[in-house]
Amino acid sequence: MAKLDLIGPVEKAMRMLSLFDVDFYDVVASYSRSLNISILGKGIKEATSHVDVGIGVRVFKNKGMGIAFSQSLEDNDIEIIVKRAVRFARVSQPDPYFKGIPGPSKVPEIPGLCDDEIVNLTLESVSQIPKGMIEAAESIRRGAMYSGGFAASHVKAYLMTSTGVSVGLEKTHASAYIQPVYREGDDVGSSYEFDYGTSLSNINPHWIGRRAAEKAIEQFGSKKIKSGFMPLILLPEASGDSLFFNLLAALSGESAAKGRTFASGLLNKQIGPENLEVLDDGTIPGAVASSTYDGEGVPKKPLKVVEKGTVLTFLHNSYSAGIMNVESTGHAIRGGYGGYVGAGPSNIRVKPGDSTLEEMIAETKRGILVTRASFTPNIVSGEFSATIDEGFLIEDSEKKHPVKNLMAGGHILNLFRDIELISKEGRVFGGGHFFPAVKIREVKLSGF
C-alpha cells in the first residue's frame, strides 16, 4: 500500500473539474498507515494496524464552496465526487470573506521528515518498544501497574489546485509514553514520561521508562496545601501545554481573524515581559511539525509571533488572510482528504531567558514547582480552571514535598502578564518545539 499511486487519481479529478464552469478547485489524495500498541497492567493490552486511503475535492463557484470525498480511488467514484462537489458549490451560500486559493511557489525540500524504519515497521518488530519501557521502569523499582503505549504513522499526500499548485508530502511520526503507578499502603506514587519524533531513533524506551519510574517515586508523600495566591514555576513540560500552545492556537485562523478567541484583539499589544519572544518555524529539519508546504501548498517559513512581549501576527491560512487582507503565513492545516482546512502552529520555539531553574527556585520564598499541568482556557473568554497534576511545594526557597488536590484558576493572559523569569535551559520536543521553564508571579490556587 505504501507504493500506492496518488498522483494519477488526483490528475484524473483535475481533468474532470476543468470541464466545469467553476471558479477555483483543489484535489487532494492521501494514504496513511498507523500502528498502535497499548500498555495496561504489566504488559501489552492490544496492538492494532490501520490503513486509510481517500481522495477529496473542493470546488468554489461565486464564493460558494462544495466538498465531496471518497475512500475509493476508482474512476467511477472519482467522477461521482467531482460532480457532487460541483453541484454543492453551485447551490452554496456565497461567503463574502472568500478571496481565492493560493498559487504555486517553489522552496527547497526539508530533510529528515520520513524515516524508512517507520515506513517498514511491523507490529511484531515494534512490540519491543513498550516492553523496553516496562523493563526500564522495573529496573528502577518493581511492582508498578502501567498504562501507556507506542504509536507510529506513515502519511503520504498529493495536492493539486486550479491555480497551479502541485505538491506532495511524505512524513513519518512515532511516539511513546508510559505511566507507572506504585502503591505503599494508602500512598500512591504516579507520573509519566514520553517522547516523540519523525524517526524511530528519536524514541529511547529505556530513558522513558526509567525517567517515568523516577518521577513516580518522587510523588510519594504528597500533601494538600491551603488555598491562596502563590507564584508558579512551570517546567518545560507544563509551560508548553499551559501557555504557548494555547496562545498560538488562539492566534490561528478564522476564529482569530473574526474575533472569536481571547487572542483576537492582541495584535500589536504587549502581553508579557520585554524578554518574551516566540517563534513559529515549520522549516526545521527532522521536526515533527515541519513540512515544505502547508495544507494549501504555501511554503513554510519561520515566523516571529511575539517579540519583546508584543504579539506581531496571527497564524493564517489563505481564508483567514483574506479576511484581514494580508498574505497567508503558511499555517494551513488540511484534515486529510475530508475537505476541512484550518490553521494552527507548527514548531513553537520560545527564546531562552537569563535564569537557571535553581535560581528561580532560590528566588521563590513559597510557591509551587509545576511539573505537569495544562491550563487549557475557554477559547473565547480565556478563563481557565484546571488541576495541577504534578507539582512540588517550594518553601524557604527549597523544593519540598509533592502536592495533591490542587487547582489553578484565572485568565491565561494574566499568566503571560505575570511572567517574571524565563530559564536559560529548556527541553526540545519532537525535534522542533522548544520550551523553557517559566516563573509566574502569582496565580490563584485552590487546595483545602
Image (tube, helix red, strand yellow):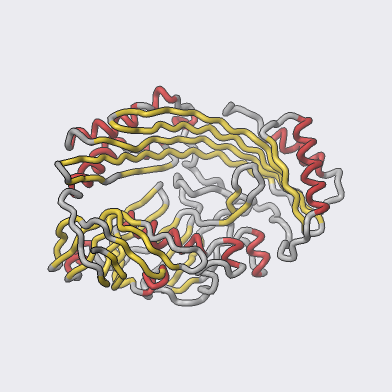
Above or below, 230 against 52 in this view is: below
Above or below, 142 against 385 in this view is: above
**Near-viewer residue (235 or 90):** 90
Where, by quadrant of the figure, is residue 138 drawn? top left
Where, by quadrant of the figure, is residue 277 drawn? bottom left
**Near-viewer residue (109 or 197):** 197
Image point (67%, 43%), residue name = 159
Look at the image and tell me whether residue 446 can be seen.
Answer: yes
Q: Is 322 displayed left or right of 427 in the figure?
A: right
Image point (28%, 65%), residue name = 446
Q: How many marks?
A: 0
Look at the image and tell me whether residue 207 can be seen.
Answer: no
Q: Position of residue 63 (x, y in %)?
A: 78, 59
Image point (79%, 36%), residue name = 80
Q: Is 200 displayed left or right of 344 in the figure?
A: left
Q: Position of residue 384 (x, y in %)?
A: 41, 64
Q: Residue at the far bottom: name it.
A: 269
Q: Position of residue 211 (x, y in %)?
A: 24, 43
Above or below, 59 against 43 in this view is: below
Above or below, 184 against 420 in this view is: above
**Near-viewer residue (119 or 58):** 58
Q: Which quarter of the image is occupied by the N terminus?
A: top right
Q: Which quarter of the image is occupied by the C terminus?
A: bottom left
Image point (17%, 45%), residue name = 186
